[in-house]
Image (tube, grey):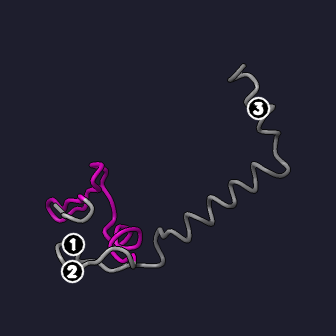
Amino acid sequence: MCPKCGAKFMNGRLYWATGQAGDPEVLANLVCDLPQVQRQGGCINQFKSNPQKDTWAKRAAFSDAMAEELDGGGPNLEDFLAGFHD
C-alpha cells in the first residue's frame, strides 16, 4: 500500500484507495507526478505520467464544457430544479 495516497497493487493490478480498480499511469497523472507530491519517500507507483490518458487538464476542460452547456442554450437550471425544492 502506498503511504502517500493509499493506492494498492495486488497481483500486478492497481486499486485506488477507494478500492476501485485503476490505471497506474492515470494515478501518476493525477497524484504521483504532481509538483506538490514527492515521489521519493514511499510512492509505490513505478509508472510515469501519460498525457494521452486522464489528466487534471482534461478533467477541467470537461467540467468547463459541461458548465457552458448548462449555462447557455440549455434549459434554465432553476426551472429544472423547481420541482425538487420549495
Residues at marks 3 and 2, CA–CA distance in whole angstroms: 49 Å
Residue 25, position as x, y percentages in the image: 35, 72
The residue that mark 3 highlights is 80
Span colored in magenta? 6-34
| Proximity of marks 1 and 2: CB atoms separated by less than 8 Å | yes
Figure quadrant of the C terminus: top right
Three-letter amino acid code of the residue under disc 1: Cys
The residue that mark 1 highlights is 43
> Mark 1 or 3 closer to N-term?
1
The residue that mark 2 highlights is 40
**Which residue lies at the image location 36% right of the left edge and 68% below the top edge?**
31
- Total of numbered circles in the picture? 3
Q: Kindly report which numbered mark, 1 or 3, lies closer to the viewer in this rendering.
A: 1
Residue 15, position as x, y percentages in the image: 26, 56
Q: Kindly report which numbered mark, 3 or 2, lies closer to the viewer in this rendering.
A: 2
Residues at marks 1 and 2, CA–CA distance in whole angstroms: 6 Å
Residue 49 lies in what quarter of the image? bottom left
Three-letter amino acid code of the residue under disc 3: Phe
